[in-house]
């Protein structure tokens, strides 16, 4: 089991399958990347109070240990003896480039029959070109022998190209090895995107904590704090350990753990968790759990455990080589030996030449090029569409999906607030309510306040606002146009003895309740609006063959069910903790479903890692989820999931077209070569010709149109929120400092 404090963390994590909880969170700030180490601990943002709602986690976290994408083409790049393509620190395309230049120059010298270019000079020239790209392949073939993995693509490439040199066909030997190396580099370019380490382990974890002991404060590492200690947390600081609030109330940004967008107000004696951000005043917390047992540490452990349990996909070329290579080598040997017994005028050199021609022809150059290039073409096409695949195997898995499970906030909804309804009390109209409340909210920087201000528009123009006061845990009061205005949660009205209709307490959305001159004046509901393409996403996925669509959310179940109904989702569950989401996903997998999970918050990271295909929303999502994911939607459009499916299917089709083309042509030319009807030049021409056709076919993937939905097309996109369209306005995405830092806007869950 790797020790995360070890200087060899990266190497140890490459082979880790599970992580013990006592090792979680053991990195200190000195071990973080320079960017992470320099990151501020948080800052204070003034604001006020409303009722709670759902929101993506703060965007700070994590590089994780490598995943299944680290294996491809029959060799594991995470091993200590990587099959690499050049000295460390050099451009991997440098030596293939030099080899290519030498090859072209050698062919030119051959063509013009330059006098000095003969004998050992010619051999040394092509030999140098060959070794620049071939010696690591030969080394890999030799190193695989002790493990019993003899018949692999390394052996086949080595025998075929050395065979070409043995019969004097130097340019062909170099060209074949160069093709192979370039194909490997293309595959490596995709695989390297999936490599991750654990250097920046959970930036949202506090790295030091102020402990009160014997009446004095002392700054310690959180791992040194014991249960029963009292810690002090300043405004803007992260809570380092789970505990109970010694005095209250206090307001916390809980986005990193729960996905709730509106800060929560905690009273004295209530539980606070590591990872929450204190927003307002100096507080004290009585520690109830050791560092390794915090909720935050458990989330990280779940992520790493899920990564360890994600099966590695063995590439087709490896399986093919295990069968194809020994057969070809055996046939080449038989081609030398058998004629000795059946041919009267047997000449060893003639049949050796034919065997080597046969071996060169049998080189699966088109396959080893077309497969990585096909997948690379699919990855490139996806990148143009704002989709990042972290390995070719995930293209295959994406095509095989039958279930898509999605988070709500930040995935299907915008992660921002919109006013859904304006409901004035009798005697007051909507424009008047909007003017009074909107004008007061201009004095707040909270996202809910910004949504109200934006929705109010010109209604607040010229309003006089004075004597504004924030009331912690309740809301705001002030004078607008000479009238006393209260705006906040229902506790604010209760505090000032303002009666309000009891049905207000039954409203599910976040709510801004108002009173004017001591009387109830109405309310505004504020909710996280669905993304414009959310409903279309569900339609396209169904049309594309997805049989089950599920939404799992940490938000209240009532809100989750309403959003699911609006979008036409099959099944939805709300009020879930990260372990609850992981349980549901595991149940679907146990039922035999091939599923993808789409999320964006830190609390989504364990489930993203557990799913067959983990998909992260990249633009607004959490770093933890993005690093854990297999596929990243860089544009934050969920409809890109269906686009990714179409790209995956097209890639699969093109790759198998190339495979069958190579098999058919190889079969024909191999038969001709065995009969002595094909020379080395014809063999290389046929091999290179098939390879070029395969390359052109693979390039075609990037030029296809993936905008067309599934079979039969789809109806036009429907509005994301058909209800109350006239009352709907959407604020721009939250500024990063509000998404990642403390909102300082107290709130309670409705």
Image: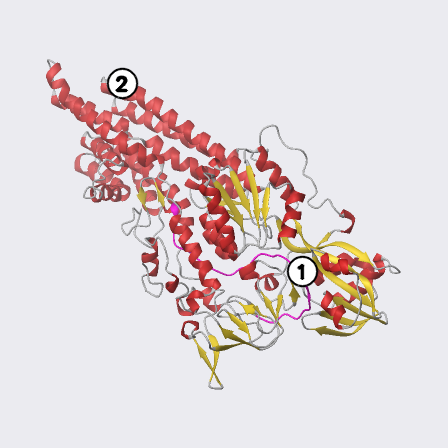
Residue occupying the far front of the picture: 502
The residue sitting at 45% across, 63% down in the picture is 297
Above or below for 572 versus 620: above
Give the side of residue 183 with respect to residue 425, left or right: left
| SS for callout 2 | helix
Give the side of residue 69 with respect to residue 137, left or right: right
Above or below for 249 versus 254: below
- Start-end of magenta stretch: 43-68
| SS for callout 1 | loop
Give the side of residue 430 with respect to residue 210, left or right: right
Nearest to the observer: residue 68 or residue 291: 291
x and y, in percent, of residue 715 in the image: 67, 33
Nearest to the observer: residue 694 or residue 71: 71
Quarter residue 314 falls in: top left
Magenta-colored stretch includes residue 374: no
- Residue located beneath label 2 in the image: 672
- Residue located beneath label 1 in the image: 750
């Amino acid at each position: 089991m790797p020790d995360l404090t070890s200087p060899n963390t990266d190497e140890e994590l490459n082979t880790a399958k599970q992580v013990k909880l006592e090792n979680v969170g053991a990195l200190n700030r000195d071990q973080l990347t320079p960017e992470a180490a320099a990151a501020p601990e948080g800052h204070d943002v003034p604001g006020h109070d409303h009722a709670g709602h759902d929101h993506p986690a703060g965007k700070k976290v994590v590089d994780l240990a490598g995943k299944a994408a680290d294996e491809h083409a029959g060799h594991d790049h995470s091993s200590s003896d990587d099959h690499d393509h050049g000295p460390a620190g050099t451009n991997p395309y440098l030596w293939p480039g030099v080899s290519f230049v030498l090859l072209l120059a050698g062919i030119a010298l051959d063509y013009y029959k330059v006098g000095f270019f003969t004998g050992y000079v010619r051999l040394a020239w092509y030999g140098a070109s060959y070794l620049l790209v071939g010696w690591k392949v030969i080394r890999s073939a030799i190193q695989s022998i002790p493990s019993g993995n003899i018949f692999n693509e390394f052996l086949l490439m080595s025998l075929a190209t050395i065979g070409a040199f043995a019969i004097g066909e130097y340019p062909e030997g170099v060209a074949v090895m160069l093709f192979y190396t370039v194909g490997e580099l293309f595959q490596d370019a995709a695989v390297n995107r999936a490599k991750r380490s654990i250097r920046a382990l959970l930036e949202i974890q506090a790295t030091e904590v102020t402990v009160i002991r014997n009446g004095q404060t002392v700054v310690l590492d959180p791992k040194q704090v014991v249960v029963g200690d009292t810690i002090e947390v300043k405004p803007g600081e992260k809570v380092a350990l789970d505990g109970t609030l010694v005095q209250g109330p206090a307001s916390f940004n809980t986005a990193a753990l729960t996905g709730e967008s509106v800060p929560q107000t905690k009273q004295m004696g209530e539980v606070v968790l590591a990872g929450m951000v204190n927003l307002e005043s100096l507080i004290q917390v009585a520690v109830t759990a050791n560092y390794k047992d915090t909720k935050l540490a458990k989330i990280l452990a779940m992520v790493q455990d899920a990564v360890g349990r994600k099966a590695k996909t063995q590439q087709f070329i490896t399986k093919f080589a295990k069968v194809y290579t020994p057969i070809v080598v055996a046939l080449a040997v038989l081609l030398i030996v058998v004629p000795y017994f059946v041919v009267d005028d047997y000449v060893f050199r003639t049949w050796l030449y034919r065997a080597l021609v046969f071996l060169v022809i049998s080189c699966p150059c088109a396959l080893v090029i077309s497969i990585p290039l096909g997948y690379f073409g699919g990855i490139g096409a996806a990148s143009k569409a704002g989709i990042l695949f972290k390995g070719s195997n995930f293209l295959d898995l994406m095509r095989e999906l039958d279930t898509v499970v999605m988070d709500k906030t930040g995935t299907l909804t915008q992660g921002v607030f919109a006013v859904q309804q304006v409901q004035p009390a009798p005697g007051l109209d909507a424009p008047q309510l909007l003017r009074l409340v909107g004008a007061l909210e201009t004095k707040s920087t909270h996202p809910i306040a910004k949504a109200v201000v934006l929705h109010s528009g010109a209604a607040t123009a010229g309003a006089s606002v004075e004597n504004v006061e924030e009331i912690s845990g309740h809301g705001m009061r002030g004078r607008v146009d000479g009238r006393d205005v209260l705006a906040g949660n229902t506790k604010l009205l209760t505090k000032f003895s303002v009666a309000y209709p009891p049905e207000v307490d039954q409203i599910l959305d976040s709510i801004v309740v108002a009173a004017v001159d001591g009387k109830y004046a109405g309310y505004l509901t504020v909710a996280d609006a669905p993304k414009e393409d959310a409903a279309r996403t569900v339609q396209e996925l169904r049309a594309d063959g997805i049989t089950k669509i599920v939404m799992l959310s940490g938000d209240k179940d009532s809100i989750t069910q309403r959003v699911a109904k609006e979008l036409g989702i099959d099944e939805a569950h709300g009020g879930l903790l990260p372990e609850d989401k992981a349980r549901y996903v595991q149940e679907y997998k146990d039922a035999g479903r091939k599923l993808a999970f789409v999320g964006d918050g830190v609390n989504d990271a364990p489930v993203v890692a557990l799913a067959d295909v983990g998909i992260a929303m990249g633009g607004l999502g959490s770093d933890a989820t993005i690093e854990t994911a297999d596929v990243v939607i860089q544009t934050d459009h969920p409809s890109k999931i269906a686009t990714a499916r179409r790209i995956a299917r097209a890639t699969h089709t093109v790759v198998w077209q190339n495979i069958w083309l190579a098999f058919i042509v190889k079969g024909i030319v191999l038969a001709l070569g065995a009969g002595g009807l094909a020379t080395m030049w014809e063999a290389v021409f046929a091999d290179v010709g098939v390879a070029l056709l395969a390359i052109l076919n693979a390039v075609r993937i990037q030029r296809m149109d993936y905008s067309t939905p599934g079979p039969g097309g789809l109806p036009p996109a429907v509005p994301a929120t058909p209800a109350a369209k006239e009352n709907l306005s959407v604020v721009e995405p939250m500024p990063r400092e509000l998404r990642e830092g403390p909102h300082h806007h107290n709130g309670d869950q409705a």
